[in-house]
Image (cartoon, coloured by chain):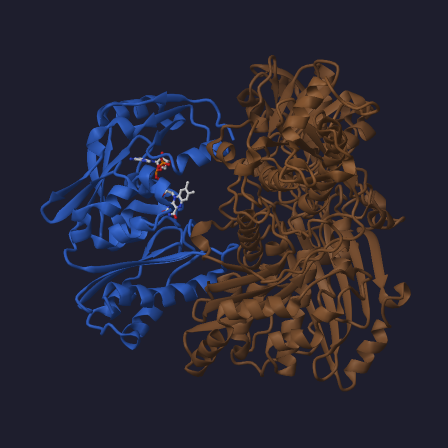
Chain colours: A blue, B brown
Amino acid sequence: MIPVEFDYLAPASVEEALAALGEHGDDAKILAGGQSLLPVLRMRLNAPEVVIDLGGIASLRGIRDDGDALVIGAMTTHHDVRDDSLVREHALLLSKAAAEVADSQIRHRGTFGGALAHADPAGDLGAPALALGAQFVIAGPGGTRTVEAADFFVDLFETAIGDDEILTEVRIPKHTGWGAHYEKFVRVAHQWPIVAVAATVRGSIDEARVGLTNMGSTPLRATATEQALAGASATEDGVRAAADLASDGTNPPSDLNGAADYRQHLARVLTGRAVLKAAGA
Amino acid sequence: MTATQDRPAAEIGKDRRRKEDQRLITGRTRWTDNITLPGMLHLAMVRSPFAHATITSVDTEAAKASKNVVTVLSGKDFGEELGVCINAWPITPDQKTPGHSPMPADRVAFAGEIVAVVVARSAAAARDAAELVDVEYDELPAVVGIKKALEDEVLAHPDLGTNKSALWVFDSQDAGTGGEVEAAIEEARNGGIVIEREYRQQRLIPAFMEPRSVVVDPTGEQLTMWSATQIPHILRFALAATTGVPESKIRVIAPDVGGGFGGKLQATPEEWIAWAVARRLMKPVKYTETRSESLMAAHHGRDQVQTLTLAADKDGKVTALRVHLDADLGAYVAIVGGGVPVLGAFMFNAIYKFPAYRFECQTVLTNTTFTDAYRGAGRPEATYAIERLMDELAAEVGVDPLEIRERNWITHEEFPFTTVAGLEYDTGNYEAATAKAKESFGYDELRREQAERRERGDRVQLGIGVSTFTEMCGLAPSRVLGSLDYGAGGWENASVRMTPLGKVEVVTGASAHGQGHETAFSQIVADRLGVPFEDVEVLHGDTQVAPKGLDTYGSRSLVVGGEALVKAVDKVIDKAKVLAAHLLEANADDLEYSGGRFTVRGTDQGMGIQELSTATFAGHDYPDGMELSLDADATYDPVNFNYPHGTHLCAMEVDTETGAVKMRKYTCCDDIGTIINPLIVAGQVHGGLVQGIAQALWEEAVHDESGTLVSGSFVDYLLPTAADTISFDVVHTDEPSICTTNSLGTKGVGEAGTIASTPAVVNAVVDAVRHLGVNDIQMPCTPERVWRAIHAHDGDAPTPQAAMPHFEEGALNQDEGAGQ
Ligand SMILES: Cc1cc2nc3c(=O)[nH]c(=O)nc-3n(C[C@H](O)[C@H](O)[C@H](O)COP(=O)(O)OP(=O)(O)OC[C@H]3O[C@@H](n4cnc5c(N)ncnc54)[C@H](O)[C@@H]3O)c2cc1C
């Protein structure tokens, strides 16, 4: 289908992009990899007058080591996140989850920042980012601020990023040497998850972080499960009680792929599996 | 002249790569949407968001004022010249058939129906303006779903007074082909076995790769329509019949077409609107649908509730089958919409010797997208029902599902065999296909593994599904179609033209849209005429080039069109013989034809067909009385359908904790008579299997209660990709059962995989969890449905016996899917 006509801007710096956003306000939309925005425009679910493409801003791309954290530029593609050696070493969970996003073509176009800013509750990167305690660096007219993961995801397709702001980078506290697994449950390979569980563990099991995808209007963290896992043994019996807590407090959707109670059941089963695989059991 | 001796001995049976693939794969061809004509205008359709509503006003002012818009037309702007969408197969004389205007002026009957068309100088301008057309509707109650339609409380078309369109009945006692069904069922209730089931064939969307597209050029003497269609000939006929343009003034071209699967076997509102607009404005126009429009408004397939009663004696020998279908036509009776479920009438009895059979098909109208042919058309539905039932019977008797089939099937010595549905199966060998499939599959070993997994209560259970299918295909004998009140014949036409330099142009009335006719037909001609494969050019899909034909569907192109071609080639040889005798100064009776050459018996004198073609062109020396042409055409109307069959075996793993299913192995042994090109057959089988597997596991078109298509994009309508399938084990019998009603001995294979695979997969899934109290899972077998089936009886009384009636309200197989 054909989108409504729009103007296209390609700023060369974050400052220019912010200025353009300031000028056009509500009528403008940021374009990252376009893998979510373009379908929305083509189906005419949104009709911005101006599209501001961040693709030409080199500083938004890439992954760097910043002491106790990794810093991932918003425009880094899923493919690069998945393949990066720093990510594998210090935030293996992100690499595993990025590998599960869509298919290879989309992973080469779609971006880490775009996916998180889009905030689809079925998106694969929110739960891992939340579980790893990511911090979101957001630039706006008044400068830059940092938002904790817990405050970043507000609702369905809604984040802490303001209309006049841009997500520039994401800081991921290092989880060096932690085992990780992203257990994604789908009916066909190219599908968004019906439910997915992001788990990363230290030792087997000293400490655990567990995030849930598509179990509510935002990514969720299974804190009760995490607590119960500390000191648990990495066996089916050892993690069962903790996994059974994973669906507590969740509010998943009901749709053609499954009713809410089925999704809650899946969350419990998949949590057990994800944790065991993360622990290498 | 090309040397014929370089040609390999036999083209038939050779794995020729498809000659059309290079251009199709690289896109170096012209699809309808690539056609651009001088001064061409673009159309965008305005579609109803409501499933049922009165149109109270259509305000086109803003749209007309929009940039680059030429005009905007709604239903009331057209008269008779708009024509109607036809139903070519009224299944009963009293069938209720709602009038089907391409663009109704007063009332819409499904969501997606067209209410106005915008004509603009670019596709983008047309699309922009379409949003500005302001249509006011008075919403009417919509009827969605077969059960609701049967209640006749809310009517899809209030003026018809009912949603019931037609009831078509076949009874073996009345037809004299078998006994009385009721008596046999009663007898089985006392001491025998009666299996009663209700199965649902969910609605599917054909989802061809190339969206539908149409270009109409009204300039010049003939009006030309290019359309991404399977049926250029039928389109020409229908345009002439309904829009008042003489046939001789109409040229329809189906250029390369990107798939159809029955979904492009339709005379569509979009084509008729483009035709009317082009004629009105006297300008070329183009319309190409979006994928969303395609999913919503191109015809859907399947959608039946099947109420089935199978009777058998206590050893599992079948004694009767009673079938009642309720089939959802959607909002209109589409071109062959009513006939599709009726085609199943002849196939429910399948390969088995039922002494008594009754079939009823009740078609109903609803406020949803109209339904029509989809790969297999009527036969997959029938095959699913009977093959599922045979597995249930095996479970009831307590024997292997292959054993129960063997007790009931027609043995190879019994052919030709007249079935209880009145068809004569010419040849077949179910024993051979089954033995070969079993061996290749490793049946016994997988059964052992299944037993072990059950024994140890493995989280992942294994199931084995069987489908021993047959089908009727190669549509078909014109007289039989006539007796079914089908609006056309089933013959096919071919002509062979010898060019001056000895090349061969073959014209066929079949209209390929991805099947590989060009390659297979070239192989047939290469062998029969003795010319190199490369020298044969196959032309099709343009009524000016191929004026006669009935197009491509129903696995008919090779078995009907290929046979017409053989007959045309034989005529060419006969004509050439007269000239050869003259030029070789020999008696025609002394000539032999082989390898493309006439030789005088007992001498080394001879002449090639290609030389004779040049000699005919020159016309310098030929016998008196000979018409100076070697070209010939032939029409072939078969005396019977043909009956491919096969044994398909499928192993599925079921994760009992999540309900997820995974295919472990799939073996099929199809007996399709003579194989012209094994590579093309493998392609048809692989693709067909995936489409059938997709019905079992993934695809389902869902309308909500108000008639909105919920599965309106590929996010919700799940099509599989290569990543979701395994490598299939495709084998054939060592000695195929050659078809006796055509000279090539071929049987159709275009639909076989789709027909056979669906029940094989569902049987396997059910088999994996039968010991947990499951005897049915509604299609598609989503993980959720499988999981719920496994846990349906948690904490309940034990499962009801498999043979108990299952027709109560709210039975598992009537769940309409969760969370809608
Ligand atoms: C067929 C298909 C399958 C897919 N399957 C999956 C899947 O399985 N799992 C999954 O997680 N995702 C999937 N996706 C989505 C994919 O991951 C997208 O890449 C991602 O959701 C959006 O990233 P993008 O870079 O393409 O962003 P865009 O589409 O360009 O933008 C998305 C939104 O975020 C905003 N935005 C982007 N960048 C910024 C920024 N720096 N600051 C502020 N706002 C910003 C845009 O304005 C827009 O609203 C799929 C997409 C497709 C097309």
Q: Exactly how many numbered labels are in the figure? A: 0
The residue nearer to you, when weighing B345 against B272, is B345
Q: Residue furthest bottom?
A: B191
Q: Is residue B364 left or right of residue B31?
A: right
Residue B773 picture quarter = bottom right
Q: Is residue B107 visible?
A: no
Residue at horizontal 54%, vertical 60%? B731
Which quadrant does the N terminus of chain B fall into? Answer: top right
Ligand 1: give its quadrant. Answer: top left
Residue B285 picture location, percent across and down = 64, 20
Res. A100 visible in picture: yes
Pinpoint residue B378: horizontal percent, then vertical percent. 71, 54
- Residue B292 is situated, as x and y percent measured from the top left of the image, at 56, 38
> Quarter of the image holding residue A270?
bottom left
Residue B419 position (above or below residue B743): below
Q: Is residue B507 left or right of residue B783?
A: right
Q: Who's the residue at 57% across and 35% down the image?
A: B4
Specify the farthest residue to the front. Answer: B603
Residue situated furthest left in the rendering: A67
> Would you place residue A65 above or below residue B780 in this image?
above
Residue B720 or B221: which is nearer the viewer?
A: B221
The residue at the point 63 percent across, 25 percent down is B133
Task: Point out residue B136 in the picture as x, y percentages from the top left corner.
Answer: 68, 31
Q: What is the quadrant of residue B574 in the picture?
A: top right
Task: Decide if residue A19 is on the left or right side of residue B165.
Answer: left
